Image (cartoon, rainbow, N blue to C red):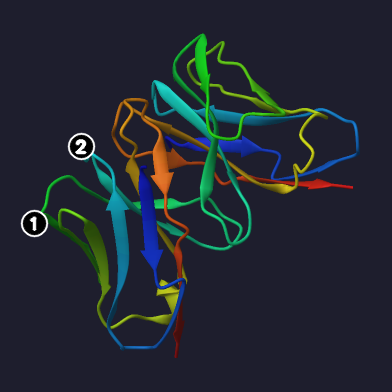
Amino acid sequence: DGGITQSPKYLFRKEGQNVTLSCEQNLNHDAMYWYRQDPGQGLRLIYYSQIVNDFQKGDIAEGYSVSREKKESFPLTVTSAQKNPTAFYLCASSNGDNEQFFGPGTRLTVL
Amino acid sequence: EDQVTQSPEALRLQEGESSSLNCSYTVSGLRGLFWYRQDPGKGPEFLFTLYSAGEEKEKERLKATLTKKESFLHITAPKPEDSATYLCATHGSSNTGKLIFGQGTTLQVKP
């Protein structure tokens, strides 16, 4: 089955820790995206990558970092510089301007 | 400024009571208007893409329509399983593949 997987489903971070969220797709899509979703707010774009080995900052990139070494993988690191990381994180992929398909999400909580 | 606004924020319907959700957008050069369904704690599920004014698409009890400034998601004779948050999104004016999301309409259908 083609799709997008994210892991872990739940993640807990202590103050000062960096954590990495995994996103893998087997849809053969060129573009991948990371969004953050907070209660009562729409999805906000953190980073996106339109091709392997290239990525751009989205609207709220501060405190986050990404890599795109393989077409199917786009991990997101939440660094200690992100002061309010508790949120629901969603990864998506697409081919060009076509619809984006989303993974199941990772809920990150700061302890 | 590119913007997507959804109304109402929340909608309660009785089973079988038809209604419509609104998505207004202000972007130049529409390259697709997307509708998604999101259940609590899950990633958005793709429903429809509309590209030009006058276009309509249907899936079971849902029909999406598009004008030059807004899109409607019509729900005919809804059932409790239609309860979810419905998101609309469109590409921004820049050619980045980035989607701009509305804040969503949370629909509750009571039996």
Residue B67 sits in quarter: bottom left
User: Residue B91 vs residue B58: left or right?
Assistant: right
Q: Position of residue B83 (x, y in %)?
A: 45, 74
The amino acid marked with disc number 1 is: Gly
Mark drawn on residue B54: 1
Query: Few, some or many C-alpha atoms within 10 Å of disc 2 (few <14, some 14-19, many ≥20)?
Result: few
Write the residue at 17% across / 45% down: B51
Camera-side residue: B33 or B80?
B33
Q: Is residue B68 above or below residue B64?
A: above
The amino acid marked with disc number 2 is: Gly
Q: Position of residue B111 (x, y in %)?
A: 44, 91
Write the residue at 37% across / 42% down: B1
Q: Residue furthest left?
A: B54
Q: Position of residue A91 (x, y in %)?
A: 54, 37
- The residue at which mark 2 appears reads as B29
Write the residue at 58% across / 63% down: B40
